[in-house]
Image (cartoon, rainbow, N blue to C red):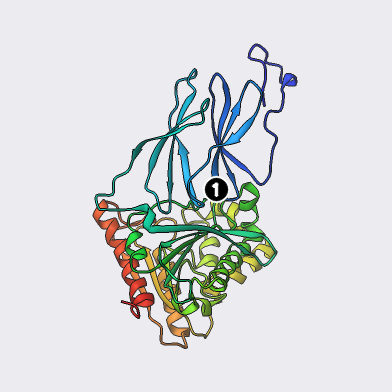
Amino acid sequence: MEVPANSTDWKNRKEVIAHNPSVKIEYFDEFKDYLNIIIIRESGLRKIKVYKLADKSAEYISMPDPAYTLGMRFNPNFDDTKMQYVYNSMTRPSTTYEYDMATKEQTILKQAELGVPYNPDDYQSERIFATAADGIQIPISIVYKKGLVKNGHNPTLLHGYGSYDASMDASFSGNRLSLLNRGFVYAIAHIRGGSDMGEQWYLDGKLMKKKNTFTDFIACVEKLIEDKYTTPGHLGAMGAITNMRPDLFKAVIADVPFVDVMNTILDPTLPITVGEYEEWGNPTEDKEAYEYMKSYSPYDNVTPREYPNILAIAGFNDPRVSYWESAKWVQKIRENNLGNSVVILFTNMGTGHGGASGRHDYLKEIVLDYAFLVDQLATHNH
């Protein structure tokens, strides 16, 4: 909204940018001649839209990759026509740009150095969409090394989160190159429960719509298989979608997973249980919420069947997801596993929910994940 600076009467307001339920405005900046620089999420991507005060025209700043993330730098000069933002993608490390709003020129001011030879042109990123069970289009961000053949035999890691309004941005990772250089496809499923596609995207993946998070993830898996990036025998996942469709995965990394949902959410003496009612529901007072949550709780839905290879990681000092959740879940899967897959529990005795602190200990945890994936998915090629 716009109001006169010399008036406190809200009735004098004028709408400048109309509300759009599919777009989330995350940040804006103001200049003398340019009304707002706004980072918005549209189609699951952050975009910067420049509004010119003189004629109220508006346009997006162009970005070089189909999947990326960006953020604004501090732009304190109100009279300036130049602004700075930081950009990175699944193939490009963090880069600071200067954009001249008058001339529309972009200039690279700084790019992060990796400390090793790296050429972004050696890698390819893509943005595709999977069709969910209810017809909604779910974005998938993908990266792999150029030369990869889509023959259905590529080891693939699909990452997803889908809770707490958090967005999974298509950002750069130098550590990930270890997988890409071994022929892996890395993909991010921008599933509902996060805010990748706006506020409604989050609302459609919580409370009594929580199952959308899981079925969206499964739809993304099926899309990767349909487009011949991979097959179930070469697919690894970050997450605990092992009860609904264990046949789709060969390996699963469950990193501090919220798997014993009912016992945790029914115990209000635990540190965050009461606050979690807004995200999942309150099963102590709502029978419908109780039945719905129990229908997808991973621990409560373990049954005799063949399970994929699993690496479950717990932090002994985790106040959010207690270590016993992973321990109980792993043991129950082992007791019910009709196949010969390995089900590994790693409990880090010195960490919390965020994993190891310190640069080197953090890297050791990544090494553990990657070693598991390479052992399970890529040993036939290397």
- Specify whether 187 is left or right of 279: left
Residue 186 picture location, percent across and down: 44, 63
In the image: residue 307, left or right of residue 357: right
Residue toward you, 13 or 73: 73
Q: Which residue is mark 1?
A: 45
The location of residue 331, given as percent across then percent down, is 42, 78
Residue at 34% from the left image edge and 78% from the top image edge: 381
Q: Amino acid at mark 1?
A: Leu
Q: Is residue 106 visible?
A: yes
Q: From what the image shows, is residue 76 above or below residue 318?
A: above
Q: Residue at x 44, y 84 (%)?
A: 335
User: Which element type, helix, strand or loop, lies under badge 1?
Assistant: strand
Where is residue 106? Give x, y as percent. 45, 34
Q: Is residue 368 above or below residue 119?
A: below
Q: Nearer the viewer, residue 344 or 317?
A: 344
- Judged left or right of residue 289, residue 331 is left
